[in-house]
Image (cartoon, grey):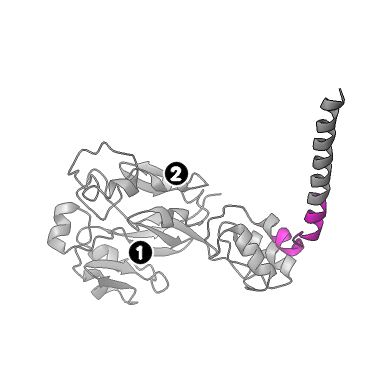
Amino acid sequence: MNGIMIPVILVAAIGLIAGLGLSVASIVFAVPKDEKAEAIREVLPGANCGACGYSGCDGYAAALSKGETDVCNKCTPGGNDVAKQVAQIMGLEAGAVTPQVAAVMCCGNSANVDTKLDYSGVHSCKIATQLFGGPKACVYGCIGFGDCVEVCPYEAIFICDGVARINPDKCRACQLCVKTCPRGLIDMFPLDTVKSAVLCVNHDKGANTRKQCKAGCIGCMKCEKVCPQGAVKVENFCAKVDYDKCSGCGQCHEVCPVGCIDLYEIKKHF
């Protein structure tokens, strides 16, 4: 009996000593809590999207608490409500969050773009682009396999006729889809204002673009010449709109020979 009890007592004693040692170490080496950072973290939405420019909500909260930034309106998913709460905790001015929504700059649906191969690999845009630029004739357009759909935490993105589309009522401007799209097709578009948007990023010469997509920008520069605000510029055979300069007059939309420039007024309906 004694031969059994001695090892049991030794193990129990070692466990007790180790437990006491860990308890003392946890007190001695404890990292002080940053109560301000924790308070900020509580009001942030928790998307951890990085739209604020930091690693996530924890990173932004820590930066504010440590005084590395005094800008309280960097959280676009949280909007003005979160900015006000953060400002109240910090004792600073909230500032305004510019309302934006993501938009897919592509018209490459089945009516405009043909397929050049039958793809049977992994259903991923990123992977499909590595096989001859994807299954569609246009190597710049939306592949439509939904990498952006998978990454969106708000279920705001869906695939319609082979092209990703975004529901503005659900979009919170976290920009995760912008970072995920391998083609760089998703842009942030201002809300509640009328603006022109070029729904194409094809940088091939006009003749090649026409072979790939019926609604692709051919770089004819008619839009640039007619814009009274100088908001439209054609660079590398593709037009681009500066939303800050665009007045929404629609003249570029009217002269576009392929119809790749649309006049948008994106609103939320709730």
Please indicate whether residue 179 sits to the left or right of residue 174 in the image. Answer: left
Q: Nearer the viewer, mark 1 or mark 2?
A: 2
Q: Earlier in the sequence, mark 1 or mark 2?
A: 2
Q: In this view, does 252 lie above or below 133?
A: below
Q: Give the residue at x 56% y 56%.
A: 77
Corner quadrant of residue 253:
bottom left
Can I make out residue 261 in this image? Answer: yes
Query: Which residue is disc 2 drawn over?
Result: 150
**What whole-number distance in Å separates the C-alpha atoms at marks 1 and 2?**
28 Å
Residue type at mark 2 is Glu
Please indicate whether residue 242 sits to the left or right of residue 108 in the image. Answer: right
Q: In this view, does 265 lie above or below 143?
A: below
Of helix, strand and loop, which mostly describes the magenta segment? helix
Residue type at mark 1 is Ser
Residue 39 belongs to magenta span? yes
Q: Is mark 2 on a helix, strand or loop?
A: helix
What residue range appears in magenta? Answer: 23-40
Query: Which residue is disc 1 drawn over?
Result: 196
Place of residue 176 in the rendered image (x, y in percent of width and height, measured from the top left): 47, 54
Q: Is residue 69 above or below residue 11?
A: below
Please indicate whether residue 60 sits to the left or right of residue 111 in the image. Answer: right
